[in-house]
Image (cartoon, rainbow, N blue to C red):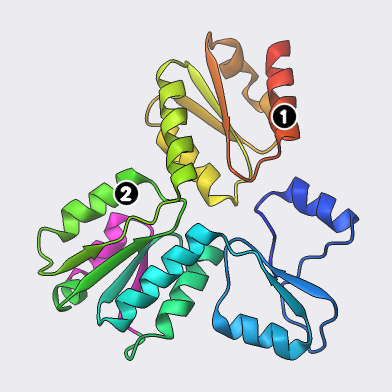
Amino acid sequence: MGELIHNSHVISELNSLGIKTLQEIPEHGDGICIIRSHGESNDVFKALQISGFQIVDLTCLDVKKVQNKAMELAQNGYFVIILGKNDHPEVKAIKANAENCLKNKNNIFVANNIDALKEIEHTIKGASKVGVVLQTTQTKEFLFEVVEYLSSFCKILNIQNTICPSTSLRQNEARELAENSDLMVVVGSKKSANTTHLAEILEKITKTIHIESEEELDNYAEIINSSANIGVTAGASTPDGIINKVIEKLNKY
C-alpha cells in the first residue's frame, strides 16, 4: 500500500519481481497487501480487509510508538502537535489515528518548521494542554527549537521525543564526519525524509550535495575535484549497492 520505501531503484526492482505498488484500494483485492513501515490509518486497514486482501502489517515499531503517543495525548484532552511533513505518509497515518481519538478534529496540527507554529500561536495559547510528537526522521535541532518556543507560553506542555534511535545515531555520525570533511555527499531519494534531513543538517557544517545515484556526481565535478576530504553518508532506504557505486566513482576523480 504505497511505495514500500522512498527509493525509486528499489521500487523498480520490486516491481520486476512482481511486488506491485497500490496507490488506491481496488474494489476487489486479491492476495497479500503489505502495510509499509510508515503505517496507515484504521480506515485503510478496514478498507483493505473489505476489499479482500490478506494484510501483512510491517509498520515500523518506532512509528507505532508515535501513533500510540499521539492517540494517548488526544484521548487525554491535549492539543496535539505533530512535528513533520504534512504530506508524508508516516505523518498522515499518525494524524489520522490521533484524529479518531479527538472530539474536536481541529485540536491537531502538523508543523514542518517553527514559523508554521507561530502562525497558530493564538490557538496554541488558547489550549489548556499541549502535547507534541515527532515524525521519526525529524532532527533534534527542530525539537529543541520547538521546546524553547512553546515552553515560553504553554501552561502544560507534554513533549514526547519520538525520533527514531537509528535516525539520531545516523545524524550524529554524519555530523562527526562532516566536521572533518571539505565536502559531504548524501546518497538517497529526494523523497526520503530521513535523507533530506541529513542533507539539511550537514549543509550547515560543510559543503554538501544530495544525490540519488552515481550518475549525478558528474554535475558536481568541479566541487569534487576541489575537495581534499570527502565524506559519504546515506539515508536508511538507500541500498548498499548504490552507495558502493558512488564511492567507486568518487575514487576515480
Where is mark 2, residue-wise?
142
Q: Is residue 176 above or below residue 229?
A: below
* Circle 2: element type: helix
Give residue 187's position: percent from left, percent from top.
Answer: 62, 35
Residue 51's place in the image compared with 175, above or below, is below
Name the spot of residue 208 as percent of width and height, x first. Answer: 50, 28
Residue stretch in magenta: 106-121
Task: Name the residue nearer the viewer: 35 or 128.
Answer: 35
Kindly identify the residue that appears in the image at 55 percent across and 30 percent down: 209
Left or right: 22 as drawn, with respect to 163: right
Q: Spatial distance from mark 1 to mark 2, Cα to Cα?
A: 30 Å
Hey, which quadrant is residue 16 in on the image?
A: bottom right
Q: Is residue 167 above or below residue 73?
A: above
Q: Nearer the viewer, residue 47 or 61?
A: 61
Please indicate whether residue 186 sits to the left or right of residue 139 in the image.
right
**Of marks 1 and 2, which one's residue comes earlier in the chain?**
2
Q: Look at the numbered disc 1 and give the secondary structure of its residue.
A: helix
User: Which residue is identified by label 1?
Assistant: 214
Q: Quadrant of the C terminus?
A: top right
| Apparent side of residue 127 relative to residue 175 in the rendered image (left or right) | left
At label 2, the amino acid type is Phe
Whether residue 3 sits left or right of residue 75 in the image: it is right
> Badge 1, how many Cα within 10 Å: few under 14, some, many 20+?
some
Of residues 166 and 8, the one drawn nearer to the viewer in this rendering: 166
Who's the residue at 76% across and 48% down the image?
10
The residue at the far top in this view is 228
